[in-house]
Amino acid sequence: MSEAAPHRWAVLYPELGTGPVSAEPCVSPEFYARERDIVFKKTWLMVARDEELPNAGDYKVKRLDVANTSVILLRGKDGTVRGFHNVCSHRGNTVVTETGDETFGSSKAAILSCRFHGWVYDANGSLIQVPEEERFYSCFNKAENGLAAVRTEVWEGFVFVNLDAEGSQSLIDYLGEYGEHMGGFPYSELSECYSYWTDLACNWKVSHDAFAEAYHVHTIHAGSFPNTFSSGLANVRLFGLHRTAAVCLSPSAELRPVQTVADKIAGGYAGAHHGGSTLPPSVNPDGMADFSFELSVIFPNLLLHISEGLWFTHQFWPLAHNRTRWEGKMYYRQPTSNSERWALQCAQLIARNAWLEDTATMEATQAALQSGAKTELTLQDEEILVRHGYHALEQFMQG
């Protein structure tokens, strides 16, 4: 990436302004309460990958603490994944007993049965069996007592839900040009997943913002990626609520010896090019030789990154105004030999170390902001994705 004007993104996107950003959204319990109701209960949220439910009858339960609910995702015999609130229509027990933030299971008949009194639901959410049904009164109508449906749609193998039962905007319309920009990448072919999560004592935006810029790479990542990435972005594009940019390599970037060996065996390092490209046409359209990966954000809480031979996500689930569950996942092509598996494990361990470096800043940031000593966040030009995040949040909350 060539040397660029210091304020190029402000010139390109003047509507975002250049002044400080209020820290209130990161520290205010009142703001969080509004944000929870207006944003997380009203918009599309990614909750699964299609390959997590490969067969008819497979299900996943995802807890959404930010909305005080959990959602069952169940694949029917017709191949469709449908979503339902995990609440029995009888007396409100959970239909699927949860074992944590995510619970997986399978039913060959593609049905769900509540363990409390044995009410049975099919893959469409319809109530199909009630023990001792004759003991209920004439006002009871089985057809009116199915599971509460949750709008569920799939894009590029990503399963999204929208808890707003009265909403009508489709997922494709919601993603708009962003969906076109990031569509067509072979996500499902790169299914070897390394997954990490932790609960952090910080607001979800503090966690989110730490991954949404490259300004920090020369300091925070001096250990895991010394002199590897440029601190500037390229090809920044804003798609309404969503946003994307290219992260580039430093001109003198070099892999360590062990990384070089591993990369020759199986790839797995963002920015390592091996001829040809699987990227969508609008990603790195100029064919920059120093392109490393596309850093993109699906509003409100999902970062999706794609590179040659790998992709990875960061997702930030609010637990309170000052608590967040971070989930990081790295995907590669399935290894076909022990040497390839070693090479991919080597690559993901380096990535894991970098993520540990990132998460190590977040709780300290939250504690400092909550002191009230500083009430504004001062952003520079290359933190354009962070600035746009607060702009998009404000616009969405204002309707």
Image (cartoon, rainbow, N blue to C red):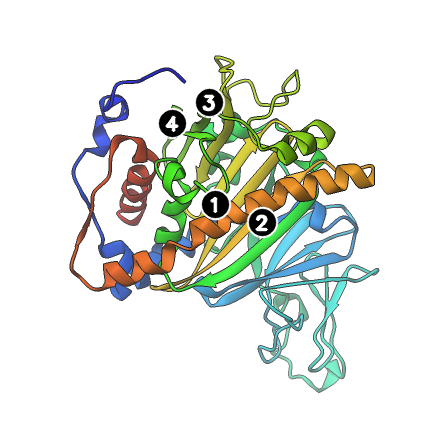
Q: Earlier in the sequence, mark 2 or mark 4?
A: 2
Q: Earlier in the sequence, mark 1 or mark 3?
A: 3
Decide if residue 222 is on the left or right side of residue 327: left
At x 50%, y 42%, the residue is 224
Image coords of residue 3 (percent x, y)? 33, 17
| Tag in front: 4 or 1 | 4
Q: CA distance from mark 3 to mark 4?
A: 17 Å
Residue located farthest toward the front when viewing the structure as drawn: 257
The residue where tag 1 is placed is: 302
Q: What's the mark number on residue 135? A: none
Looking at this view, is 364 or 246 the one in front? 364
Decide if residue 361 is on the left or right side of residue 109: left
The residue where tag 4 is placed is: 233
| Tag in front: 2 or 3 | 3
| Tag in front: 3 or 4 | 3
At x 50%, y 45%, the residue is 354
Under mark 4, the amino acid is Leu
Under mark 2, the amino acid is Thr
Q: CA distance from mark 2 to mark 4?
A: 34 Å
Q: Secondary structure at mark 2?
A: strand
Task: Please say whether residue 335 is visible from this viewpoint.
Answer: no
Q: Secondary structure at mark 4?
A: strand
Q: Is residue 195 above or below residue 265?
A: below
Image coords of residue 148 (percent x, y)? 57, 63
Image coords of residue 96 (percent x, y)? 67, 70
The residue where tag 2 is placed is: 152
